[in-house]
Image: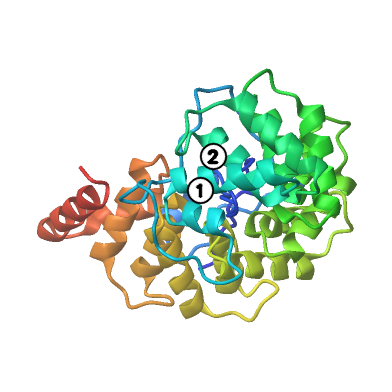
Amino acid sequence: MTLARSRPVQPRLPRARLPAVLLALLLAAPLAVSPAEAQNPAAKPAAKQTKPATPAKPATPAPAAPPASIPLLPSVTADTSPVPPGGDGAYGAYQRGFYLSAFREATQRAEAGKDPAAETLLGELYSHGLGVPYNAAKAADWYGRAIKDGSVEAMFALGMMNLMGEGGPRNLKAASQLFEQAASKGHTAAAYNLGLLYLQGEAMPQDFTAAAKWFKVAADGGVSDAQYALAVLLREGNGVPADPAAATRMLKAAAAEGHVTAEVEFAIATFNGEGVPKDEAAAARLFRKAALAGNAIAQNRYARILSAGRGAPQDKTMAAAWHLLAKSKGLGDPYLDGVVAALPPADRKKAEDTARKWAGE
């Protein structure tokens, strides 16, 4: 049994919070299954793509109502806990969810003189309506002041506002300029976003070489989305010389960071022994992890593993349950349909009930 590779997908632009960067990927598209697999569970699945593919164009974010705030902590009342010596009282209050205290402390500091950290924090509070009413204009003003005083985080945050069209029309040119300024100063999320904009070719001429350059900056900084995107470019030879070994290393790094799509891709490589030592048991563990995270391709591949007992003990009932869950998401598989049909009625019902339970029905 050889497992087919999932199709590469385009990471989408993240909406980052201060200071954490929230990155996400679109799920990979499902693969068809060759007719031969319907007869033999060990038959080779659908052939891999032979035409070079690149990450697709990222979805264009539409202007929206004020962005959702980060989850609130139980209380937003004034924080009276002591601030450790040398600590940032405003940011400490922000981290604990005491947004009014953070606002008062940051305002006092910003009014006392140049304080890029306090100015950036004020922009963040206005940008997300935390402790104060949402106000994009005030957020942009505070971010602008922080940028003048040297805040790299503010460059990124204002770039995101321009990208998303918060407080006005989208301005991709301004966003790309701010991302480049921040990326040049080591901001990895800005480097990742800049790579996406070069890949998209809307804010500037499409340039795969520039995209790969900035993806590498972000990948070297541990951004798993960038590691996955760079792996795709390295595998297909777009913007960089094709280097399957380097692509596999990037996939492995992204998978180690919990990047679900990379987990699936690396699990396939591990199961098939492509660029890495063949290890069906390790691949099965990765497939199960990604399947539990909701990835339909992983659910399908894990179902195949369970049906054949390759890398994990054979369990056709659980294989059927995983298949039915993946199938409910649009990923069919004639071979696994046959596995389900061949089950005794009681086992088939158990698989159906389990799949419905997992789907939350």
Q: Is residue 179 left or right of residue 41?
A: right
* SS under mark 1: helix
The residue closer to the viewer here, 220 or 294, is: 220
Residue under the image location 74 percent in, 42 percent down: 146
Q: Is residue 161 left or right of residue 174?
A: left
Q: Residues within 10 Å of mark 1 (few under 14, many from 20)?
A: many
Residue 233 in the image: above or below residue 2: above
Query: What kind of colouring is applied to the model shown?
Result: rainbow
Where residue 284 appears, x then y in whole percent? 45, 72
Question: Label 2 belongs to which residue?
Answer: 125
Q: Is residue 74 left or right of residue 67?
A: left
Residue 232 in the image: above or below residue 158: below
Q: Is residue 47 left or right of residue 358?
A: right
Where residue 88 appears, x then y in whole percent? 58, 60
Instruction: Name the quadrant containing residue 266.
Output: bottom right
Q: Name the amino acid type tagged 1.
A: Ala
Asked whether residue 31 appears in the rendered view, the answer is no
Q: Give the spatial CA distance, label 2 vs label 1.
A: 9 Å
Q: Are marks 2 and 1 in contact (CB under 8 Å)?
A: yes
Question: Label 1 belongs to which residue?
Answer: 102
The residue closer to the viewer here, 357 or 74, is: 74
* SS under mark 2: helix
Which of pointers 2 and 1 indicates the residue nearer the eye? 1
Q: Tag 1 or tag 2, which sits nearer the N-term? A: 1
The residue closer to the viewer here, 290 or 115, is: 115
